[in-house]
Image (spheres, rainbow, N blue to C red):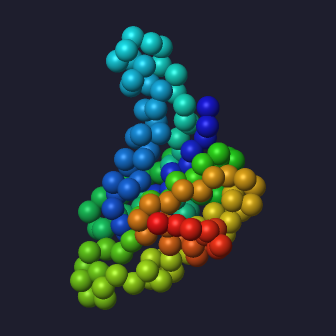
Amino acid sequence: MLHVAVLFLNGGCASTALLPMEVFRNTGVLWNLLVGRAPAPRFRVTTASVGGGPAVTDHLVSLTPSCAVEEVERPDIVFVPAGGLPLDTLMRTGYVIDAVIERNAPVIPWLQRWAAQGTKIAGVCSGVALLAGAGLLDGKLAT
């Protein structure tokens, strides 16, 4: 069973963390149950935030992780969701990707640490900017 750590970041859309978390958790379970096979989970999912406190997405929803990033046991995969900016900030300033990186800068050394140890790192939306900020996309193509 692979260990996946899904980050909960302030700002952005909760769905970019919750949907992947649910997909990872249900892989090997739901389909197996539907076709009469024994459940065989493929992933163990941990959710984490900087400091372990709730992450607030756009002032609407708080996501409470299972632990702080510093407490995550070696993951096989780290999933980085959108760590965007609240809608009211976007309306005032526009979308400034450097602000997203700055707002979530504490996760950059954490991403670098796990990447150096061979953990696969995946990101979506503005979370990819954190991978770039960590130097993990240097010399690589990314979309």
Can you give x and y, in whole percent of width and height, for residue 105 in the image? Answer: 56, 75
In the rendered image, the quadrant that contains the N terminus is top right
Q: Quick check: 30 left or right of 80?
A: left
* Residue closer to the observer: 27 or 68: 27
Pick whichever, 11 or 132, lies toward us: 132
Please tell me which residue lies in front, 8 or 4. Answer: 4
**Residue at 26% across, 75% down:** 87
Q: Position of residue 14 (x, y in %)?
A: 34, 57
135 over 77 or under it: above or below:
below
Depth order, front residue of 59/138: 138
Tag count? 0
Please report the residue visible at 31 percent of the width from the left and 88 percent of the height from the top: 93
Q: Quadrant of residue 131?
A: bottom right
- Residue 45, placed above or below residue 80: above
Q: Is residue 108 visible?
A: no
Q: Position of residue 53 (x, y in %)?
A: 48, 59
Give coordinates of residue 110: x percent, y percent: 65, 64
Among the 4 quarters of the image, the one containing residue 21: top left
Q: Residue furthest bottom?
A: 93
Height in image: 60 above or below 26? below
Residue at far front of view = 141
Q: Which residue is rendered at x = 58% and y = 76% of the image?
A: 133
Residue 87 visible somewhere in the drawing: yes
In the displayed orientation, state which residue is furthest to the right.
Answer: 117
Residue at point 71% right, 62% down? 113
